[in-house]
Amino acid sequence: TQSIGGLIVFAGLIFVPAGTWHYWQGWVFITTFTLCTVAYTIYNAVYDPALLERRMNVGPLKEKETSQKIIMTLTMLGFIALISLSALDYRLQLSPVPAYVSIVGDIVVALAFLSVFYVTKVNSFAAANITVESEQKVIDTGPYAYVRHPMYAGAFWMLVAIPFALGGWYGVFVLALMMPVLLWRLLDEEQIG
């Protein structure tokens, strides 16, 4: 139910600002995003249901710290703006990109999902909200051997790719506004952890 409702809202964020259903970039993006999300969810439902539960507890209301509630609210608003502005950019043809750039954007989105999957395979405690559990250990293998916060690195590339996948590049300006918030989350997480 949550997935179907989320998909309807997600489609609205794309196709309402685009002003048309005849928006192949929107269809390819939503298909890519949905297939990656469904595959990730099914895999974890079968092989790591505790991780799936931790990943589904997302959003400002699920955070314990006031700072994280604010950060998650701003992040969600930024994500909505990133998607909607990119679709509006397509509608108004403000900064169209070639078709191959949109396809590359979708590929990067899929690779970013793959990187998040890899991170959660290595660290089953990678929750959507910031928590420290008693049996949780510091991970220094896999991607953690190279990057302190590999999930944020994967998410960053996904956010960069979304405007291009949706057929424009003005959404990157929204990402520039989101970066201080994401940095705040990362630094705040370091203090909490």
Image (spheres, rainbow, N blue to C red):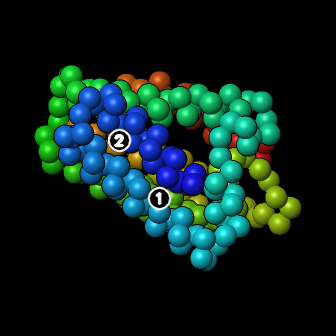
Q: Residue furthest bottom?
A: 47
Badge 1 local density, few (<14 within 10 Å), some, or many (20+)? some
Query: Mark 2 or mark 1: which comes first in sequence?
Result: 1
- 24 is higher (above) or lower (below) than 184: below
Q: Amino acid at mark 1?
A: Thr
- Of circles 2 and 1, the one toward us is 1
Q: Position of residue 192 (x, y in %)?
A: 78, 42
Q: Quadrant of residue 1?
A: bottom right
Q: Which mark is residue 162?
A: 2
Circle 1: element type: helix
Badge 2 local density, few (<14 within 10 Å), some, or many (20+)? many
Q: Position of residue 32 (x, y in %)?
A: 34, 56
Residue visible at 61% across and 77% down in the picture: 47
Q: CA distance from mark 2 to mark 1?
A: 15 Å
Residue visible at 41% across and 47% down in the picture: 158
Residue visible at 68% across and 36% down in the picture: 60
Q: Amino acid at mark 2?
A: Ile
Residue of label 1 = 37
Left or right: 49, with 91 as reference point: right
Circle 2: element type: helix
The one nearer the camera, 192 or 57, is 57
The one nearer the camera, 81 or 20, is 20
